[in-house]
Amino acid sequence: MQNGLLVVLAATPAWILGVCLYRLYFSPLAKFPGPKLAALTGWVETYYDVYKGGQFFFKLKEWHEHYGPIVRINPWEVHISDPDAADIVFAGNSQFNKKIEWSYRFGIPQSAFDTVDHHLHKSRRAALSPFFSKQKIAGIADLIANRSQRLCDRLDNEYKHSGKPVIMDNAFTAYTFDLITAYVFARSDDYLEHPTFCGPFTTAAKSIANTVHMTGHFPWLFTFLQSLPKKWLAASNPHMGEMFTFHEAVENQVKVIKSGDNDAHKHVSHKTVFNELIHSNLPEEEKTVERLRQEGVSVVTGGIETTSTALTKTLFYILNNPAVRDRVCAELQAVFPDPRQTPPLHVLESLPYLSAVINESLRMILGFSQRIIRTSPRAPVVYKDWVIPPGAYFSMTIYFSNFDAQIWEAPHEFWPERWLEDESGRKPRARNGEPLAKYLLTFGRGPRMCVGMNLARAEMIIGLAVVLRRCNMELFETGMETVEMKSDYFIPMVDKESNGVRVIVK
Ligand code: HEM
């Protein structure tokens, strides 16, 4: 026994030395530039993300400035900072997988979003995407307009002329929450009716995000926590408590649709996603409560925070730039004479300046701040002179492309005019002469591009048009600290001291 222990003790340093030598000199990634410590151990990333709180993102920026467009950022992964590399990482015909360790971090490895294998992802996505086509979303434009008008009724009745600030982060979260739950479950929790626009799960998506580095760096953690009594979790960490309660609420939604106890889909004018999925001819193993709970959590959380943040920040940029506000309001007035009669979606979509404003804010808001990782299981991937071996991870960060000074003039300025056609009808161009739209990566690209993109755009176009048309707003003690990213928790987090984007309705 004692001898065995001695052998282990003697062998451990040799094993560690062997791993270090392999990672530094013999690994297929050894030739890639980057800090030696990061090549040696994944703990560098863990340190910046878990201990320093979502700071690895900023380290990546620093490393690229020092080492160039491709950097080895941990023993298993290279990160690329080059907008043209999106053609490789997000290639439409690619068959890349996702990183397996990350598929457990939200506890939804069976959702399309966190499905690792390309082929399984393709079939799961095929089941989901028809509900989010442009045509299907146009079919729920009235529902979106109705919720936008309801939001403004409340702003009119309870805030107008009162001098009382309203936190638009909460108001827009209520709006996106009500819409996504109505569309996918035929059920609305009516967050827009809550006195402060805050329902029980208003902060659920943020809570989920807050735990992402812990559960991402320690892939067993989510499953372990899930097995503990919820009371303990809630007492030890309110984010965890809220996250698991939210999972349970989604599971209940799936159960009541499956059992027929929720037949609200019969009384609404649109098809509801989970009712359709449950009664579709998908294989039974894809329709279990557990699988659909995971898909539900993915779609609902995907649909709330990203879009409400986009709306809130867009409103901030508009109100913070009076020239932009005046121009977009004048354009709206021409097609939207009666503020209570929302024009059809296609009319709003055809407004060039409103579209430019939305594109520009989508460029700046960053739905996802964390890098997006892929791996090619069999074939190598070539980037310039670099050959990334099969099985290695490679990644890109949307922010780096959306703010790249080689593509965007004055990238840190909110400047919607960059998106307008010139007098001859020529489409806007990037600084390198390519079409500008090609470099807007906010929704990702390729086979895993955001499935909810059309819904997000429709919610933004209609929501902003109605709010701007009906309410005369002014920012209240709100500065850049409410929109600038201070840490990356998968989604961008602003300063902890920020009170959110607050407005007065005049
Ligand atoms: C401004 C709002 C939004 C932004 C910026 C955004 C961003 C993204 C991005 C970048 C991805 C790709 C992730 C990857 O490649 O790994 C994605 C995927 C996804 N998004 Fe969104 N999203 C938004 C709104 C929505 C909405 C409203 C929904 C609701 C349906 C949604 C549901 C999803 C789902 C289910 C996926 C996974 C798709 C797949 O893997 O096939 N998102 N989103």
Image: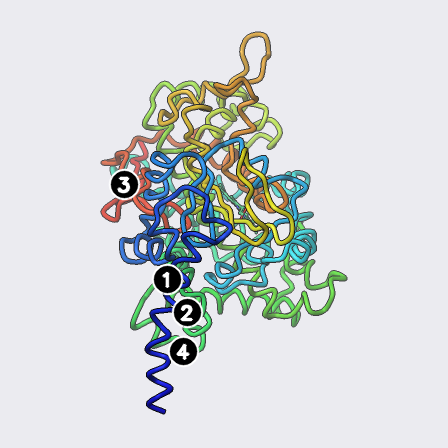
Q: Earlier in the sequence, mark 2 or mark 1?
A: 1
Distance between mark 4 and mark 2 Cα atoms = 11 Å
Please rate how many residues cluster around mark 2, counting C-alpha atoms within 10 Å: few if below 14, some from 14 to 19, many from 20: some
In the image, what residue occupies the spot 43% across and 46% down? 72
Check whether the beta carbons of the residues at disc 2 and disc 1 lie within 8 A of each other: yes
Residue 214, labelled with which disc? 1
Secondary element type, mark 1? helix
Looking at the rendering, in which quadrant would you find the N terminus?
A: bottom left
| Disc assigned to residue 165 | 3
Q: Position of residue 253 (x, y in %)?
A: 56, 65
Location of mark 4 (residue): 228
Q: Regarding mark 4 in the picture, which secondary structure is present there?
A: loop
> Could you say which is closer to the camera, residue 9 or residue 58?
9
- SS of the residue under disc 2: helix
Q: Residue under circle 2?
A: 221
Q: CA distance from mark 3 to mark 4?
A: 41 Å
Give amino acid for label 4. Leu
Asked whether residue 412 appears in the rendered view, the answer is yes
Which of the two discs, 2 and 3, sits closer to the camera?
2
Q: What amino acid type is highlighted by mark number 1?
A: Met
